[in-house]
Amino acid sequence: MKKTDLERNELIYKLYFQDKLTLTQISHQINLSISQISRVLSKSPNYVQEKNKRKEENRKKHIEQTKEIIKNKRLQKQIEEKQILDILHNQASFELSYIHSMSKYAIRKNCSSAYNYNQNKKRFELKDDVAYSNDMPKIIKY
């Protein structure tokens, strides 16, 4: 081996083991192919151990990133569901407020157990056995 090859190999070892660079990063710095760098590194007794250590670190990092992505998706879904519930709540509050008179549809929707559907006349009719206020419509047509 030439002296320049030894120097080059030492530089590769230093960049890989001490500076923790990847093979691609080393290849760009030294202008060698990745396979040549891999061949040089494979001669080192510490290479397999370091490679496995990096694989394990990357696996753990990947698991943490996946957990974070799932957590963010769940949080986003909760936010969207809360917004939908807020809209529905506001709509129901508006329909039931005393400022505005309730539509027959809103009354039918919120007092569904007080009405029966008459198939022949195609309308909802107030049940006879139900206590109700005088302002409730006896018939709701659609």
Image (tube, helix red, strand yellow):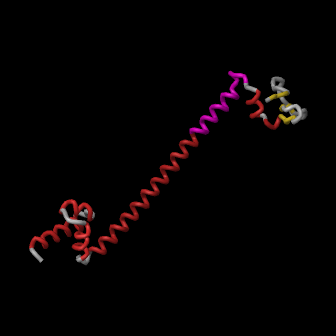
Residue 88 horizontal side relative to residue 125, left or right:
left
- Pick the residue in front: 7 or 34: 34
Q: Quadrant of residue 44?
A: bottom left
Write the residue at 39% across / 61% down.
Answer: 61
Residue furthest left in the image: 3
Q: Quadrant of residue 5?
A: bottom left
**Location of residue 65 in the rendering, given as x and y in whole percent from the top left corner:** 42, 56
Write the residue at 57% across / 41% down.
Answer: 82
Give yes or no for residue 95 being in the magenta stretch.
yes
Write the residue at 25% across / 64% down.
Answer: 20
**Location of residue 28 in the rendering, given as x and y in whole percent from the top left corner:** 22, 60
- Pick the residue in front: 116 or 24: 24
Residue 77 higher or lower than 95, as above or below:
below
**Location of residue 94 in the rendering, given as x and y in whole percent from the top left corner:** 66, 28
Residue 106 higher or lower than 7, as above or below:
above
Count of all numbered marks drawn on residues in the image: 0
Q: Quadrant of residue 45?
A: bottom left
Residue 127 horizontal side relative to residue 92, left or right:
right
Quadrant of image for the N terminus: bottom left
Report the magenta stretch's main SS.
Answer: helix
**Location of residue 127 in the rendering, given as x and y in whole percent from the top left corner:** 88, 33
Residue 104 higher or lower than 14, as above or below:
above
Give yes or no for residue 115 being in the magenta stretch.
no
Magenta stretch bounds:
83-101
Residue 54 horizontal side relative to residue 68, left or right:
left
Residue 73 higher or lower than 20, as above or below:
above
